[in-house]
Amino acid sequence: MIARENPARIAEIVGTVVAATPGDVDRIVRWADGEQRAWAARPIADRLTVITEAAARIESAIEELAELLARESGKVVGDCRGEIGFAVRYLRWVVEHAPAAYADRDTDDERGRIVEQRRPFGVVAAITPWNAPIILSVLKIGPALAAGNAVVVKPSPLAPLTIDRVVALFDAPIRAVHGGPETGAALVGHELVRKVAFTGGAAGGRAVAALAGDRLTPTVMELGGNDPAVFLDDATFAGDVMDRLVMASFATSGQVCMAAKRLYVPLARLAEFVSSYREAAGRVLRTGDPLSAGVTMGPVISAAAQRAARALAPPDAIPLGTFDADPATGYFVRPSLVVAPDPDSPLVAGEQFAPIVPVLGYTSEDQVLAWANAGELGLGASVWSADEGRAFAFARRFEAGFTFVNTHNRTGMSLRAPFGGVKRSGWGREYAAEGLAEYVQTCVIHAPAAFRPGAEPGGGPSAYPAH
Ligand code: NAD
């Protein structure tokens, strides 16, 4: 049994789920494999109806689900509502776009007849983290089911309760299995799992990719990030801009893959920036119970995360916003800004995944680009400028999978653009047409013109076509 405590009130157990043994994982994967054939044989319109119905059920339960998610994850209830609402919108987006994405392409021309079939893989394993368990699971579940796959979801044991409820709302071949790395490994290593979609950190990703690689099972990897936010010398520090920036760093207590994790401003404007940033934090950052009105930041996820966050904050870190929480009864961490730390310090060079944010002053665009592009992670980034053309030109030089202009992360999310990392932030894509394409394999049937019944005899078989 896995019991999940409320990170804002450690003494409160929010709920339990049954931990899956390797035998349970085997039984569930075999069940999913058996169901998948009939599911794939149904017309796509039927499968999409099932997804539409699931989206409606999730939407009608949104208040209850958001509260449960806030209690198990420590994320503020408004953000939980936002995450679940976004998952519903994404499912509807899949329903709209799947028919074109998954249709066979049948051409008959001077080359002969070519049919490109989009076929499901079979059983898809979805392994997801705790920080946005609903949207990050639904990004895999929606397209995988639409394409005719069965799905086995392995959520994080740190937030298993809400996703367990969401999975049960699909009248489709999908189940959740619960547990930690061993459960994930039993799932990824199963002979009947044909595709793995993983979101999480580098260590877990490496282990999952190695296991999948051993079986030659294809993977989608969405890994960590250490997103830079670069203010060009013409950028404004106006109130609304600073408010947006503060929440891009501190939403979910800094535990977001694409949070603004390190800030860079022209050295000559550093003092002005720090002052505007502190004022903005005073306006928009209030730490407290995630279910209380007006609270914009809750606790971190666990005692280990609380210890790690405290270790990252030097004594001169500037505390931010209103702190209305007790770090003894919940895993709370005082949000803070660290001015001009060593560019090679762990807070700047690694992914802090905590509400401690560094700001550094730079003296030239080349210097800040070198700093921003340092390190192995290339998930997101942002550039802030009064001149959009200049911002786009600068953004082309970032080593990042996704760059925002004059915002960062959640306020800029769009279903039209694919997300994913470069360098060691992962491979594969989610959202948009690229995300749909991850869940089908293309099989080609070709009758070359020269060998079709009734074709003029000539030439004989040659090793390569003429063009
Ligand atoms: P994690 O890697 O610890 O866990 C993710 C999932 O993988 C969990 O379900 C976990 O139980 C499982 N897992 C871990 N090790 C495993 C192993 N050896 N074998 C099989 N399964 C294993 O990550 P986390 O702490 O839950 O999430 C935080 C990380 O996720 C951060 O690095 C964050 O940046 C990243 N993240 C990335 C994205 C993205 O879209 N790129 C989104 C959210 C979070």
Image: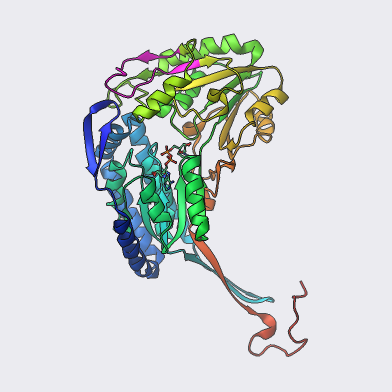
Main SS of the magenta segment? loop
Residue 269, percent across and down? 62, 12
Residue 268, percent across and down? 66, 11
Regarding residue 430, the answer to whether it shows in the image is no
- Quadrant that contains the N terminus: top left
- Above or below, comparing residue 44 to residue 165 in the picture: below
Residue for point 61% across, 18% down? 265
Residue 386, percent across and down? 63, 22
Colour pattern of the rendering: rainbow
Camera-side residue of 385 and 152: 152
422 falls in the magenta region: no
Camera-side residue of 449 and 296: 296
320 falls in the magenta region: yes
- Quadrant that contains the C terminus: bottom right
Q: Quadrant of ligand 1?
A: top left
Q: Tell me where residue 446 sits by quadrant.
A: bottom right
367 left or right, relative to 422: right
450 left or right, relative to 181: right
449 left or right, relative to 71: right
- Above or below, comparing residue 306 to residue 28 in the picture: above
Residue 237, percent across and down? 56, 16
Regarding residue 166, the answer to whether it shows in the image is yes
Q: Tell me where residue 10 sits by quadrant.
A: top left
- Above or below, comparing residue 76 to residue 243 in the picture: below
Q: Tell me where residue 175 sits by quadrant.
A: bottom left
Q: Which residues lie in the magenta part?
A: 319-337
